[in-house]
Amino acid sequence: MGETTLLEFKRHLSNLMRARFPFIYIPTWEEERALSVIDSAVKNEALIKTVRKVFIWSMTDGLAEEGQRGREESKSPLRCLEMIEASEEPAVFVLKDFHIFLGGGGRPADHQIIRKIRDLIPALKRSVKPKNVILLSPTLTLPSDLQKEITIVDFELPTFVEIKTMLLEMVEANQMSGRIVIDLTPEDVERLAKAALGLTLHEAENAFALAMVEDGKLDKHDVEIILEEKRQIIKKSEILEFIKSDLKIEDVGGLENLKRWLLKRNKSWLDSAAQYGLPAPKGVLITGVPGCGKSLIAKAISAMWKLPLLRLDVGQIFSGIVGSSEENMRKAIKTVEAISPSILWIDEIEKGFSGMTGSGDSGTSNRVFGTFLTWMQEKTKPVFVIATANNIHALPAEMLRKGRFDEIFFVDIPTYKERKDIFRLHIVKRLKSPKSVGDFQLTDEHLDLLAGMTEGYVGAEVEQIVISAMFEAFSEDRSIQLEDFRKAIQTMVPLSVTQAEQIQGIREWANVRAVAATPQEDREEYRLEPGKREVPEPKEEDIKLKRGGRAIDF
């Protein structure tokens, strides 16, 4: 919530109160911050016109003005509602945790309280002096009896300015004490504050305090501690998983077309991109042959863009309790947006959203799917969605139309050039100890030979070839040899043989509906053996039939 949005919240809340909306529900964990905003709104004559007193109710303190304790009898929720009805002065009554009487917190709804709320509504509307009731709770619980009577107002998380102000206050307080070393430039302060976006003020304060006490100082390197606090939010959701990856985009062999597309969109969620007139990208759907690096590219994007990567387990969305699946999806979306800018990764999306017929589950699958599609189409927060799919035919047509994803990329079996890159990456990554390397020296001729012997092998199979070759050498307690790679290749049957029909079906679909992740110049080298570079290149139509994917380069 930017500063303009915070002002809009105050204005909207004030208008609701001026219009005599009797009951307003604000679901938020930030009780103290919400009370501060409510207090500033009801005392701003320019917004509210008629200034009101603020009374606060809780089960422990009863009903009283802020900072005071009410009479013992006012601790009763029913008596509290009666006192609100009897009040004869302009006032706003904030009821804390009143949701437990409406069926929240695992308790049954108190129908006497619900009936009293309904009785109180006309009295509040007709009161000579303006009176409003605000329900303030960490969760939203609203029985069907009150759904037409209570207005819900979302209270967004702290703005960048709020977090930065709080951080500067902490810095000033600890600099005066002299116990903590503060080593921050103005840019570092901005970076720390932006890293904390998505946290409540309390969570952000805890993260900054932890960063200070861990090593006795606060500097730009403490961003990781802030991100760890965000991981705690994800762990509590149970539906999302925070993926921490050290992969770099250079660790992914080939797929240069896809890499260029992603590189051009780096930092597109920053203010500079908005000033340029560019919207934040929605996301990409990556389909293709299993084992060709679709999941790997999702992890590498997170490292390249320096954004948190969250994996959504669609299976966890659907639970046995009626109505909870839809709520799970809404919570997942809200959590992802809370820590934006972020990347949402849905692996093998066709398994979660295939066969949306609505039969057998009272239409729950359709409603959850519809919620997700609507969010993808209309989301305003910078959340980049990466969806991977092996069986693209199982996906509903609604998901594939333009507007959901910016682009659909097809990842095929690696080309000759890509196989060389993949072999180089895995051999260099794994052969590090002198004992395993010995006299072996990786040359371009070796890579030519290995790439030529593995036509039709996917990236995961190339990795297993390198691992198998190392086991061969390890079992004989010697260094690696080229012959070890040969043996591993000869004993492996590639996926392109065992699933030839399925792969051909994916290629035919992708030929007219997707963009090839591999650039045209690399795909033309497909099937060329080492030492045969002068062989006439295949025709364009043959390349498309064999490789699949629209010939568009970025």
Image: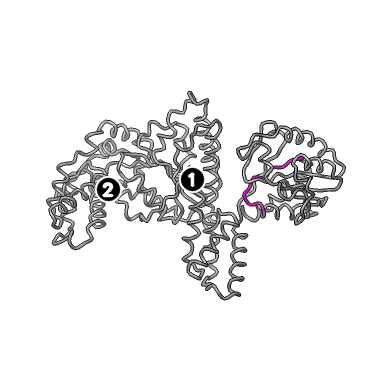
Q: Nearer the viewer, residue 254 or 371?
A: 371
66 lies left or right of 139: right
Residue visible at 87% across and 42% down? 128
195 lies left or right of 432: right
Q: Nearer the viewer, residue 472 or 406?
A: 472
Q: Say whether disc 2 or disc 1 marks the residue closer to the N-terminus.
A: 1
Task: Name the secondary structure under disc 2.
Answer: helix
Q: Quadrant of residue 538?
A: top left
Q: Amino acid at mark 2?
A: Asp
Please give the label number shown on residue 364. none
Q: Is residue 14 magenta?
A: no
Q: Amino acid at mark 1?
A: Lys
The image shows a total of numbered marks equal to: 2
Pinpoint residue 533: horizontal percent, then vertical percent. 17, 49
Q: Quadrant of residue 108?
A: top right
Residue visible at 40% across and 34% down? 351
Q: Which residues are magenta?
A: 22-31
Residue visible at 61% across and 56% down? 159
* Disc 2 versus disc 1: nearer the observer: 1
198, above or below 237, in the image:
below
Pinpoint residue 157: horizontal percent, then vertical percent. 60, 52
- Mark 2–mark 1 Cα distance, whole angstroms, equals 28 Å
Identify the residue position indicated by label 1 in the image: 282
Q: Nearer the viewer, residue 257 or 430?
A: 430
Pinpoint residue 67: horizontal percent, then vertical percent. 75, 57
Residue visible at 23% across and 52% down? 423
Identify the residue position indicated by label 2 in the image: 522
476, above or below 211, in the image:
above
Query: How many residues crowd mark 1 within 10 Å: few (<14), some (14–19), many (20+)?
Result: many
Task: Name the secondary structure under disc 1.
Answer: loop
